[in-house]
Amino acid sequence: MDELTLTGAQFRDMFASGAALLEKNRAAIDALNVFPVPDGDTGANMCMTMQSAMRELQKIPADANVSKVADTISMGALRGARGNSGVILSQLLRGFSKALKGATVMDSRLFSEALKTGTEAAYKAVMRPKEGTILTVSRMISEAVAEEYEKGANVYKLLDTACAEGARALAKTPDLLPVLKEAGVVDSGGKGLLTIYRGFKMYLDGVEVSDYEEEPEEPAMADDAEVAENITYGYCTEFFIIHLNPSFREEDLVSFREHLNRIGDSVVAAYDEDTIKVHVHSDAPGKVLQMALRFGELDRLKIENMREQNRALVADRKSKEKEYAMIAVSAGAGIDELFSELGVDHVIPGGQTMNPSIESISKAIYQVNARNVFILPNNSNIIMAAEQAANIAKCNAVVIPSKSIPQGIIAAMNFNTAASVEDNRETMTEALGQIVSGSVTYAVRNTKFHGRDIAKGDIIGMLDGDLCVVGQSVQDSSMELVDKMVEKMGFNDCTITLLYGADVSPEEADRFLSAVQEKYPDAECIMQNGGQSLYYYYMFTD
């Protein structure tokens, strides 16, 4: 075994890197919360817990050994723990304190033991542990690390294993916890823990936190009224028990947690260094405090009425509700910008090869927070999903059956905030038939169409959804398609709008624009960067 070790100073810096990466990505982690309940957001709670530990670290000497650093982190995290996720995180960090007790440096054995001990402490702190949460992610990481340690891996390799296994564990959480699967997200606490460990690894790899960012997760959606109904217990109660009675034993926490679970849920009671951190949801906070007084003095007491806070959230959302909003499915950054300029409130990534789900569209409808929402699917394969999302929406959702990006653009151009819902529906739908739209892409396989042989890689042009051009050159095929579009319009003094894709350089696009302008001098020609993949050009004439 390669006996690489970490000093106290390295462990401190490693922890600081984890705290910094967590802070950098707190918004993305907050967005994973299944319900917008006012019980604190996971990312924020975990960040404040880590920050409390960092403040304590600043009070100890720079040359403190790993045992002192771990003890300081553990106590700081417990004192500053917020919400369930913060308390559980403090227990995971407590594992480092126990495993590193008396150690000068940390080797692979101690690192593996720290993860194992922390996981055990976290499971004990939660009366009814649920799989599919941060606990599952921590357990799977500790088990994988233990296996690698037995094979002779050093502490650096073990951290690689922790991050790799953490990613696999996180991906499994929706399959283990139905509420996550229903919301279409992974567990936020598990995501936070993995982010911290990735920060640890970044320090050892010499990577700056500013050079890395977690992939954002699509936020979950929940109706505010349903959230209020799902709050079983109305009061979130948090406090510390300090100056514990001489008769107190850590085993007393078992019966204490059982009592709390009889009158509430979301129970966490964590013990460390003569201090107990308690978090519980109940309808009888007085009883909770009365039970706690048997063990010692109460400190930093916080009781929040979650139902009232949820009412405030509902009222705030209602006060910000707009009359109208538009949602559009888009296929490239340039097209995103164009839709934004046309007044589209929310863009859903998607297109021919990536059709958004009913849930994705439903979430977008919820997020724009409007009484009337117009949906532009911009693809024939997405219209049905958009209609289903509209059917289950809490607001009035109207699907404009746009079958292409150009149709979506012309529909958005015809939206009028001063018009009624029905007038907008009629005008936007009619606009779909007032343009001729085309697209240029390539054949993905050999085939035959309308008696013509098409080879894989041929350039093909689609006119209003029908294949009408087959060629070898992008520019020649695109010009042939323009010719057919102008011919179908029936006059030359039209507007020709061209959106070039990711596989077309700005120079190529400029040359093509010049060629179109030269051939059709009476037309108004517009070229914009669409940024779409797979399609060299989207184009339309009106």
Image: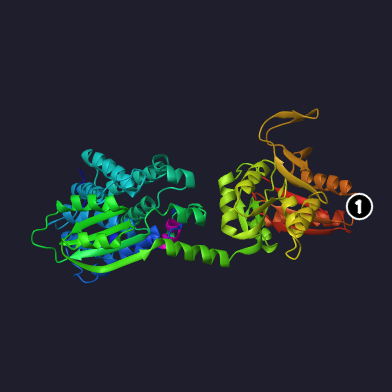
Query: Few, some or many C-alpha atoms within 10 Å of disc 1 (few <14, some 14-19, many ≥20)?
Result: few
Q: Which residues lie in the magenta part?
A: 24-30
Q: Quadrant of the C terminus?
A: bottom right
Q: Residue at x 89, y 59 (%)?
A: 522
Coordinates of residue 420 in the picture (x, y in percent): 75, 60
Regarding residue 216, the answer to whether it shows in the image is: no
Q: Residue at x 52, y 54 (%)?
A: 223
Q: Residue at x 76, y 47 (%)?
A: 475
Q: Is residue 158 left or right of residue 423?
A: left
Q: Quadrant of residue 448?
A: top right
Residue that carries the numbered disc 1 in the rendered image: 491
Secondary structure of the residue carrying tag 1 is: loop
Q: Residue furthest left?
A: 246
Which residue is at the front of the view, 220 or 104? 220
Q: Is residue 102 left or right of residue 171?
A: left
Which residue is at the front of the view, 425 or 336? 425
